[in-house]
Amino acid sequence: MIWLIAKKEFHDNWISHKITIAFVLCIVLLMVSLLLALKDYSERLSSYSLSRSEDALFLDRIATYTIVDKEGIATQGGSNIGDMIDTIGIYRRSVELSVLARGLDDRMNRPIRFLDIRKLGPQAEISVGNKQERNKLLALFPPVDFLFITKVMVSLLTILFAFSAIAGERETGTLKLMLSNSVSRGQLLLGKFLGGYASLAAPFLVAVLIAVLLAAFSPSVALGSAGWLRIALMILVSLVYIAVFFFIGIAVSALTRRSATAVLLLLAIWIVLALVVPNVGWLVAKQIVVVPSEQQIDTEKFKTARQIEDETEKKHPSGSYMPGYGQYHVEAQSEINQALKAIEERYEVLRQKRLSLSRLLTRFSPVSSYVYSIVGLAQTGIEDEVKYHSFMKQSQIRIADEVERVFSTAFSSEFRQNPPPREDPHAYHAWRVKGDEAMYDSFRKMYIPVLSLTFEKLSLSETLSAIRLDLLLLLVWIGLTFVSATLAVMNCKVR
């Protein structure tokens, strides 16, 4: 009897063109979005390769280092070393599965650069700019990828398939007829679910498989065995997500007398779960855990650095001066680095508290758990960014130490003692050029290994460990919605 009800439900959806509409929407949306994503991904790869090659060439184009004294008088020479360290960065290659779930991939393409040494000394910092990202409209219009289509469009289609599952039968009088025969309410629930779910899952799976094969044949995407397994898990999680909304639809359909009422109530529930809970959760977390803006933190860092420099200046006057920064003391840099590190660590703790709280609050919606699971499987999730950020921090510290060493050498007695008199311009210029060449050569040797740094991604086991809570919550949502649908069908009125 269950299969007869399921076949009837599937047939009703077919003759009402719901299946055709679902297939057309899924295939068109997925194909168009994937084609655009593949084109964008290819451009990002080209930009990535170009950025790395440009930086390698840039090291060879810089000839000298220009020192500006306290009076603003520059030595003869070419480019400023500050321009070089502000230009060269460490880049991360975009992951292949970002074509399906863009997630935080753009945030993980920010290179390590250096703050302008004239503002805060030679402190390594992670740049907020992104030399690899060219499409500024993405900030205004989020990419319509597989994640977005499933999260929004397919869940709305689920409402289209489920809103009349019970209410429609009640309106036409067939519900009373079915239950008057040897059909239990449990069989009715399972039959309606299987028939309706198959009506939507079938066109969705066909569209997804076509889109995935299109991505696999793209020359810019190289999917290994781990990549295919991740895609399979993404599809499986998506099917679970669709089932959650389908059970919600059946429950509401059983509790309402008319299909029109059911569809309006389902739309309200969808808005709460898909839009209100995720956004309100983040806003509430921001109000509870207050973190200063980046500008405020940078200002605090600058004031701290200047305070240490000024205190050192009172004890040991320095002849080194940077416009926009002030007196520079080599011996104070270690203390400055420790102070700035303490400031950053203090605010990083607050950021992590706010993030943890916001994720906890947003998980009251199955939509959030689904998003966290999919971006995790696509290697564009929060845990991936944490690992990326950890690598960046380690590289930042290592490079900052190297920069401090280079600057310490540059301002040491080796380059400062026994200068020839300025009355002899040829000898003085030769002395400065020799120091400039040594400075440049030190920076060049430091940056050559920097350009070859690579990023390690989370393995599949690490990903599953990171998203296990969200996968478990989706299963909990399946259980809760199934129980709700069962109770609603068991207690629904026949007429």
Image: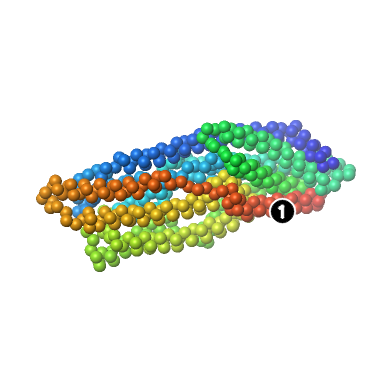
Name, please, the residue furthest toward the right. Answer: 181
Residue 189: x and y, percent? Answer: 79, 46
Q: Residue at x 38, y 53 (%)?
A: 399
Q: Is residue 32 visible?
A: no
Under mark 1, the amino acid is Leu
- Residue 408 quadrant: bottom left
Residue 231: x and y, percent? Answer: 61, 41
Question: Mark 1: few, some, or many residues within 10 Å (few <14, many ≥20)?
Answer: some
Q: Residue at x 50, y 52 (%)?
A: 387
Instruction: Name the colouring of the figure.
Output: rainbow
Q: Is residue 330 visible?
A: yes
Name, please, the residue furthest toward the bottom. Answer: 315
- Residue 163 quadrant: top right
Residue 103: x and y, percent? Answer: 54, 45
Q: How many marks can you see?
A: 1
* In the image: residue 82, left or right of residue 12: left
Q: Residue at x 66, y 34 (%)?
A: 206
Q: Residue at x 44, y 40 (%)?
A: 48
Q: For this rendering, which residue is in front, 104 or 483?
A: 104
* In the image: residue 412, left or right of residue 2: left
In which quadrant is the N terminus drawn? top right
Q: Label 1's element?
A: helix
Q: For this rendering, which residue is in front, 152 or 80?
A: 80
Q: For this rendering, which residue is in front, 350 or 338?
A: 338
Residue 250: x and y, percent? Answer: 74, 46
Residue identified by numbered label 1: 480
